[in-house]
Image (cartoon, rainbow, N blue to C red):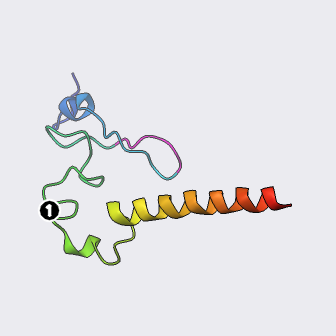
Amino acid sequence: MSDHTRTTGAMRASLRCGAKTRSGGACRAPAVHGKTRCRMHGGAKGSGAPRANRNARKHGLFTGDAIAERREIRVLLEEVRKALEGMR
């Protein structure tokens, strides 16, 4: 035991945040109690977008319908390319 007035044993023994840093290493901050992330990486109360966030739906580029439409267009373009190759 240390003769230090504050003990840091509990802090040292706590689980660490599972996030990756920009440099590719693991975040070394302690995770928030009951969560897998620290307060800076989404473990804090109220962090993240609210449910049914209207701000996330600005353009609709990533809705299910838009993604399906792009897939259909890609398939159609591939068919056209094959048809054009066959005409040569």
Q: Is residue 8 above or below residue 56?
A: above
Q: Is residue 5 left or right of residue 26?
A: left
Percent across and percent down for residue 17 are 31, 40
Is residue 73 toward the left or the right of residue 31 in the image?
right
Residue 87, by quadrant, is bottom right
Q: Is residue 27 magenta?
A: yes
Pick whichever, 62 or 44, lies toward us.
62
For the stretch drawn in magenta, the main secondary structure is loop
* Towards the viewer: 58 or 32: 58
Quarter of the image that includes the N terminus = top left
In the rendered image, the residue lying farthest to the right is 88
Residue 69 in the image: above or below residue 60: above
Reading the image, the residue beneath label 1 is 51
| Residue positioned most to the bottom | 58
Identify the residue at horizontal 18%, vertical 31% (top origin).
10
- Work out whether residue 63 can be spotted: no
Q: How many numbered circles does the render carry? A: 1
Magenta residue span: 23-28
Amino acid on which the number 1 mark rests in the picture: Arg
Residue 32 is left or right of residue 79, and the answer is: left
| SS of the residue under disc 1 | loop
Foreground: 54 or 79?
79
Say which quarter of the image contains residue 80.
Answer: bottom right
Task: Locate residue 24, reporting x and y percent.
Answer: 52, 45
Write the residue at 34% across / 72% down: 60
* In magenta stretch: residue 48: no
Residue that appears at 41% across and 61% down: 67
Query: From this viewpoint, is residue 2 visible?
Result: yes
Q: Residues within 10 Å of mark 1 (few under 14, many from 20)?
A: few
Location of residue 12 in the rendering, given as x and y in whole percent from the top left corner: 27, 31
